[in-house]
Image (cartoon, coloured by chain):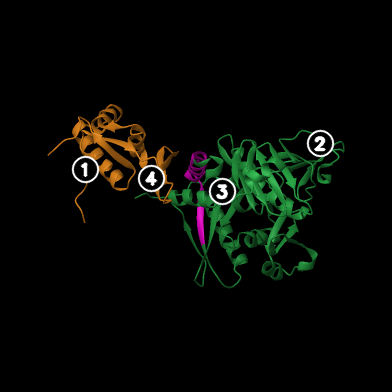
Chain colours: A orange, B green
Amino acid sequence: MMNKSLIGSDQVVVQNEQYIASDMNGETVMMNVESGKYYNLGMVGGRIWELSSSPVSLENIVNTLVAEYDVTYDVCLEQVSEFAGQMFKEGLIEVVAEKDGLRVE
Amino acid sequence: MTIFTVNKTINKTIYQAFGLHFDSEILLPELLQRQDTQEADVNIEIQDLSEWRSVVNTRENNFTMQSIGFMFEIPNTALFCIQDGKRIGIHPFPDADMDKIRLYVLGTCMGVLLLQRGILPLHGSAVVINNKAYAFVGESGAGKSTLASTFVQSGFQLLSDDVIAVSYENGEPVVHPAYPQQKLWKESLDLFGMSEDQFKPLHDEVSKFAIPVTKHFHNKTVPLAGVFELVKMDSEYVAMREMNRLERLHAMMLHTYRGALIPRLGLKQWHFSSAAALAGELFALQILRPTTGFTAPELMNQIMRKIYQEEMQGDTIYSTEHFN
């Protein structure tokens, strides 16, 4: 229905505190405390969640993942940007600010 | 204050339940006794909690953590305080019914105590099949006790008929035996050909009866091998389906005994992590059963077939699943 929402590399995201998360066989599962809705973020998704425990730019997340996984920066950025977009849509993360202050485009 | 003149010098009775030893000032005839030890993990005591009455007896403060423990008041019965998973304090009110006090000690107090000790209590019944525990969980009236009773009638042993205490031994989930009692609805007694005047009605659950199970009680901790979630459904036959991981997680969260008290105990994160750890590798089936007609023996046969199939697949039971 809508085009994919993407989060740009310079946007800063942070976990939504309404969720509790836990490890389940190496993957991260979550629950929204208010709605009781459950999510499985998988392994890499769980790492992204973990990295956004305090405000972090998408660029920093991608840099970390590139160091940890066998993936090129561009591919990683594309996938993380889309995944973060989904997380944002579901309310799992919040976009707190642009990295270098507000951008006007 | 005559109610507090309990003679503390009498020989103490050590009771056993949920893998714990209890030193109790009130009689707990439902529980098994231990003659071989005087050591206790938990003390159940008559305690003067008068000063807390005015704090706890408001709607907002009943069932809350106070500085001395988790407290709740049941009008005309008692004020209860559960402290650090080590002590249950009871302040009985005048003319309180001891049966009713015991019901809360064995119910809500035990649930809170187990949670405080990091033992996950599931609400349901558990039986032993091939030296492993299988748990039946579900909403009230889903048929957990009736099903467990059917297993018991067929010669299997019961671990619990209300609170299933799950903890870990060497990284594996285990179930600790509760106490040798079954709770059955009147309708179930009738079906099993038992007469209700032989048994004691449980307080507040007028059509539920307590039935002692002696030789069919399994008094040893056993590994938890699987969970069956019973769900009533409008249909004519029984259906079984494997639950995926998030469904299992949800079921563990939903069927935690006294789960509603967990946020008040400050144990939300612990609860979620425990449920996730348990649900991760658990063999779990959802059983959709018809609302009418007695299907417990048929259900038992189907469950036995499933368990047999699972056990044929290897020692450890992992369920197959697909995500997204």
Name the one closer to the observer, B79 or A33: B79
* Residue at 49% over, 39% down: B269
User: B303 above or below B279?
Assistant: below
The subunit carrying tag 2 is B
Over which residues does the magenta segment extend? B269-287
Percent of width and height locating residue A71: 24, 32
Mark 1 vs mark 4: same chain?
A: yes
Does residue B87 appear left or right of residue B62 in this picture?
A: right
Does residue B168 appear left or right of residue A66 in this picture?
A: right
Numbered disc 4: secondary structure = strand
Q: Are marks 3 and 2 in contact (CB under 8 Å)?
A: no
* Residue B180 visible in the picture: no
Q: Residue furthest front?
A: B54
Mark 2 vs mark 1: same chain?
A: no
Determine crowd level at label 2: few under 14, some 14-19, many 20+ residues with C-alpha closer than 10 A. Answer: few
- Magenta segment: does it hold A33? no
At label 2, the amino acid type is: Asp
- Magenta segment: does it hold B271? yes
* Residue behind mark 2: B36
* Residue behind mark 1: A6
Q: Quadrant of residue B196?
A: bottom right
Question: Disc 1 vs disc 4: which is toward the camera?
Answer: 1
Mark 3 vs mark 1: same chain?
A: no
Mark 3 vs mark 4: same chain?
A: no
- Mark 3 and mark 2: Cα distance apart in space: 44 Å
- Mark 3 and mark 4: Cα distance apart in space: 35 Å
